[in-house]
Amino acid sequence: MDRSAPSPRELLEIAVNVARDAAATAHRMRAEGVSVAATKSTATDVVTAADRAVERQVLDALGRLRPGDAVLGEEYGEGDTGPADPDGVRWIVDPIDGTVNYLYGLPNSAVSLAAEVAGEVVAGVVRNINTGEEWTATLGGGAYRDGVPLRCSTETDLGQALVATGFGYDAKRRLHQARVVTGLIAQVRDIRRFGAAAIDLCLAAEGRVDAYYEKGLNAWDLAAGGLVATEAGLRVAGLAGRAAGPDLVVAAPPALFGPLHDLLAELDAAGGP
Ligand code: IPD
Ligand code: CA
């Protein structure tokens, strides 16, 4: 195999096939019944048998299709692949984003799979486990839902904006995030909390919400959905010129980014525990 330069399109094709099989497994396991297998950072940060089985399936599939690539996953970290070659391909997988929704049988949960080349995300897919909606993007190649090209909202007035956000699993962090929402909610049309960051980013890409922000995202929550959002025209960044990351992710159409950014900075959205 020529390992030097897989194109974003080639990587996306692999990602889509692997994510579809993974979502099918998650869907089947949900139908068979699901329970908490363990907890992670807090008592409400749960992992189900499906999270683990789906990530294992993705690792096995990528190992077959792209032997030697690095992988970072939510449940198994770097797995057996070890640290990434800085110039090589690294896959970033969240086997189930929206695990709590999945556990409760709520519709927003997704498999998220992205491919990085030399540290930059170049391809990504987010597939809703329940509805089969599938969002894809390649770097410079646009964003799509089920093959239809996406553009973000054209809203320019923050007061009219429907803004999605999420909350972490740690109680102290959630309290700080709730205070930020208290400062924000009267300045925007309304707030939505859907429970799956990757889907939130894709909904913003479609203009089904105008913007999204959240503190505390991990690489696997952000990688694929962040590319979908960027390719749909959203500006995706942190505060004060920093890249989007664990401190804060703000995803907003260009006209809304400045006002939302400034309000979030004033409310110390990247601060707190
Ligand atoms: C969580 C979801 C949730 C977000 C949390 C994430 P998980 O991911 O994306 O919407 O608010 O920050 O940790 O645990 O369901 O994979
Ligand atoms: Ca997850």
Image (cartoon, helix red, strand yellow):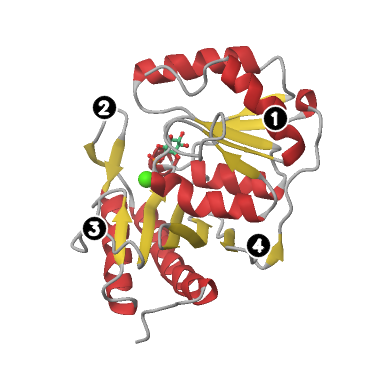
> In whole angstroms, how far apart are the C-alphas of marks 3 and 1?
36 Å
Residue 58 higher or lower than 129, as above or below: below
> In whole angstroms, how far apart are the C-alphas of marks 4 and 3?
31 Å
Residue 115 higher or lower than 218, as above or below: below
Q: Quadrant of the C terminus?
A: top left
The amino acid pointed to by label 4 is Tyr
Q: Position of residue 213 (x, y in %)?
A: 57, 32
The amino acid pointed to by label 1 is Gly
Residue 210 visible in the displayed image: yes
Q: As rendered, which of 144 and 235 lies closer to the eye?
A: 235
Q: Residue 83: which numbered mark, if any? A: 3
| Label 2: which secondary element | loop
> In whole angstroms, how far apart are the C-alphas of marks 2 and 1?
37 Å
Q: Position of residue 217 (x, y in %)?
A: 43, 37
> In whole angstroms, how far apart are the C-alphas of marks 4 and 1?
26 Å
Q: As rendered, which of 160 and 34 lies closer to the eye?
A: 160
Sequence-earlier tag: 2 or 1: 2
Q: Are the two marked residues, 4 and 3, in contact with CB atoms closer than 8 angstroms?
A: no
Residue 137: name its quadrant.
Answer: bottom right
Residue depicted at x 46% and y 67%: 20
